[in-house]
């Protein structure tokens, strides 16, 4: 038989050539292994894509929040400046009377 360090393909070939009764179950096992491996690869790729989309969404949200905070700060500054200007006009009117 093959050595203990033989590759899976060499072991598979040995089984096919020397143990015909094990060939069908071995092929079935290999088929299931390949299906599982394919599912793992697909799931891993999906997980990576979802993580990338989540990171992109979080960056987008952070950028939008930053923009909104700047807009609110500018609005607050504008309100404060308008109140100060209004207050100055009110004092001038009081002084004139």
Image (spheres, rainbow, N blue to C red):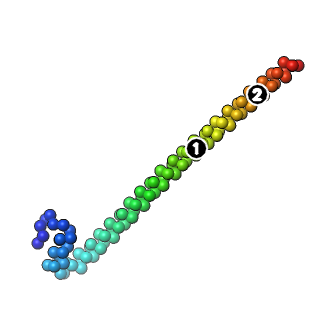
Report the Cα–Cα distance between label 1 and label 2: 30 Å
Q: Residue at x 64, y 40 (%)?
A: 71
Choose top left, top right, bottom left or bottom right for residue 83: top right
- The quarter of the image holding the C terminus is top right
Q: Residues within 10 Å of mark 2 (few under 14, many from 20)?
A: few
Q: Is residue 44 above or below residue 94?
A: below
- The quarter of the image holding the N terminus is bottom left
**Left or right of 92, for residue 30:** left
**Left or right of 30, for residue 57:** right
SS of the residue at dot 2? helix
Choose top left, top right, bottom left or bottom right for residue 88: top right
Q: Residue at x 29, y 69 (%)?
A: 33
Earlier residue among tags 1 and 2 = 1
Picture coordinates of residue 72, whole percent (x, y): 65, 39
Residue linked to disc 2: 85
Q: Residues within 10 Å of mark 1 (few under 14, many from 20)?
A: few
Q: Residue at x 48, y 53 (%)?
A: 54
User: Looking at the image, which residue sits at the far bottom?
Assistant: 20
Q: Is residue 1 above or below residue 65?
A: below
**Left or right of 66, for residue 9:** left
Residue linked to disc 1: 65
Choose top left, top right, bottom left or bottom right for residue 82: top right
Q: Residue at x 16, y 75 (%)?
A: 14
Picture coordinates of residue 67, whole percent (x, y): 60, 42
């Amino acid at each position: 038989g093959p050595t203990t360090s033989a590759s899976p393909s060499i072991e598979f070939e040995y089984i096919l050539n020397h143990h015909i009764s094990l060939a069908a179950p071995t092929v079935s096992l290999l088929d299931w292994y390949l299906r599982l491996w394919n599912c793992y690869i697909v799931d891993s790729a999906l997980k990576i894509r979802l993580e990338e989309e989540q990171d992109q969404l979080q960056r987008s949200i952070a950028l939008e929040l930053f923009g909104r905070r700047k807009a609110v700060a500018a609005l607050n500054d504008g309100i404060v400046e308008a109140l100060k200007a209004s207050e100055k006009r009110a004092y001038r009117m009081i002084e004139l009377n």
